[in-house]
Image: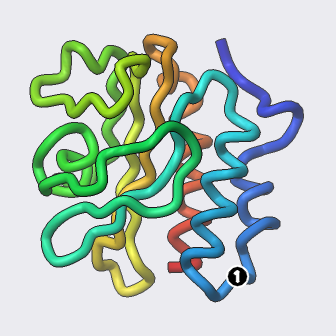
Amino acid sequence: MTDDFSGVKLSVAMRALIGDETDEIAALSNACALIFQLVPDLNWAGFYRYVRGELILGPFQGKVACVRIETGKGVCGTAAKTGKTQIVGNVHEFEGHIACDSASNSEMVVPLRRKDGTLFGVLDLDSPRFDRFCDIADEIEAAAREISKVL
């Protein structure tokens, strides 16, 4: 099943919403709100910032979340350590998964880099639906590239 995000291309909407914003927190806040609003079947959308070797919770939409995640731990920490997007169709099969919300069944985490190439943090999306992100991963990554442009 593919999503048309209610007829809106997520990356285009992201660029229009935050493309000129100079404040990171404002941009990230609106970015996660837009994702949460446009992408069906999410129960969490937000950011973890890479600060002094660990991931620290940033703006998000959804239930309360883990505040700190060690680099290399869980799906978020793995994305931060490897620098590669992680798409997990069934989080219950991911060794070391950190369960902040027991309703989550799939997860996608995209590393975000500053303009100078250093790691800013990660975009983290959770869904109660198994295999939620397989068919929309390219558009989520395109939206993440738009987010990285303001960091």
The percent coordinates of residue 15 (x first, y second) are: 74, 65
Residue type pointed to by label 1: Glu
Tell me if 17 is positioned left or right of 71 in this view. Answer: right
Q: Position of residue 56 (x, y in %)?
A: 29, 63
Q: Residue furthest front?
A: 64
- Quadrant for residue 22, please give it: bottom right
**Residue 43 percent coordinates (x, y):** 54, 29
Front position in the image: 69 or 110: 69
Q: Tell me where residue 76 appears, x and y as whole percent.
A: 27, 46
Q: With respect to residue 7, does 129 lie above or below?
A: above
Looking at the rendered structure, the secondary structure element under dot 1 is loop
Of residues 63 and 104, the one drawn nearer to the viewer in this rendering: 63
Residue tagged 1: 21
Residue 94 placement: quadrant: top left
Q: Residue at x 58, y 28 (%)?
A: 42
What's the residue at 58%, 30% (across, down)?
A: 136
Name the residue located 81 percent from the left edge and 66 percent from the top edge: 16
- Specify whether 9 is left or right of 11: right
Please give the name of the residue rendered at 66% of the width and 45% of the height, measured from the top-left corner: 35
Q: Quadrant of the N terminus?
A: top right
Q: Quadrant of residue 107?
A: top left
- Residue lying at the far right of the rendered structure: 7
Q: In the image, is residue 40 above or below residue 25? A: above
Q: Foreground: 67 or 149?
A: 67
Mark 1, Cα crowd under 10 Å, few <14 / some 14-19 / many 20+, is some
Name the colour scheme: rainbow
